[in-house]
Amino acid sequence: MELKRFQKWAEREYSAKRRIIALIFESILFVIVIPFFLAMISHFLDQWLQLPRFVHGLVNPLLSLLLIVPGWFFALWSIQVQFALGCGTPSPLMATQQLVVQGPYAYCRNPMTLGNVLAYLGIGIWIGSLSAVGLVLLFAALFGAYIKLIEERELEMRFGSKYLEYKRSTPFLVPRLRKRG
């Protein structure tokens, strides 16, 4: 039943203007709202659980930047490719109209998820919060399960053998060092 809903959403094409508006709202959610709540919730969890902060001078911000910058780059590159080549957005409500296997999708099947997880881990390290890191890892596990149980099945239904071949030849989340041939 749930997959039919995703399939119905994916059948509808949207103008570039509508997709841009959707991306603005999605960007606000993923770049501002989620990091804000991650910081706020982890602050309260750290206090409640009496977890120590881990702050090591310049190590936290430097390590954080090494995660945040490539994380956001990978996520934004994924969105740009979905928009330009797939004629869609990251939202299942405005799904891509074509199977996207170029750009970051040539390295792994879920580069946007990878990018967001890296960026959010960077935020957790920046603020020195064990619970923030734990929340990000929990988010990654739950989102990975959603992708495996729902999104991949929906993509198989929409794109058939082309998606199955892509799935067989491209890693799920951890990118390979070279693009597939």
Image (cartoon, rainbow, N blue to C red):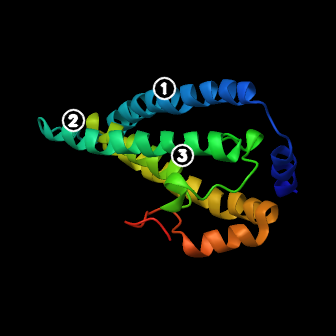
Helix, strand or loop status at disc 1: helix
Tell me the residue that label 2 is attached to: 61
In the displayed structure, does residue 109 sit left or right of residue 162?
A: left
Location of residue 147 by image quarter? bottom right
Ranked by sequence position, the earlier of labels 3 and 2 is 2
- Judging depth in this view, the residue of 133 and 13 nearest the camera is 13
Is residue 131 at least partly visible in the picture? no
Viewer-side label of 1, 3:
3
Residue visible at 27% across and 44% down? 66
In the displayed structure, does residue 179 sit left or right of residue 146?
A: left
Tag 2: residue type? Pro
Percent position of residue 52, x then y? 23, 41
Tell me the residue that label 1 is attached to: 32
Residue 150 vertical position relative to residue 94 in the rendered view, above or below: below
Is residue 45 at least partly visible in the picture? yes
Label 2, residues with CA under 10 Å away: few <14, some 14-19, many ≥20: some
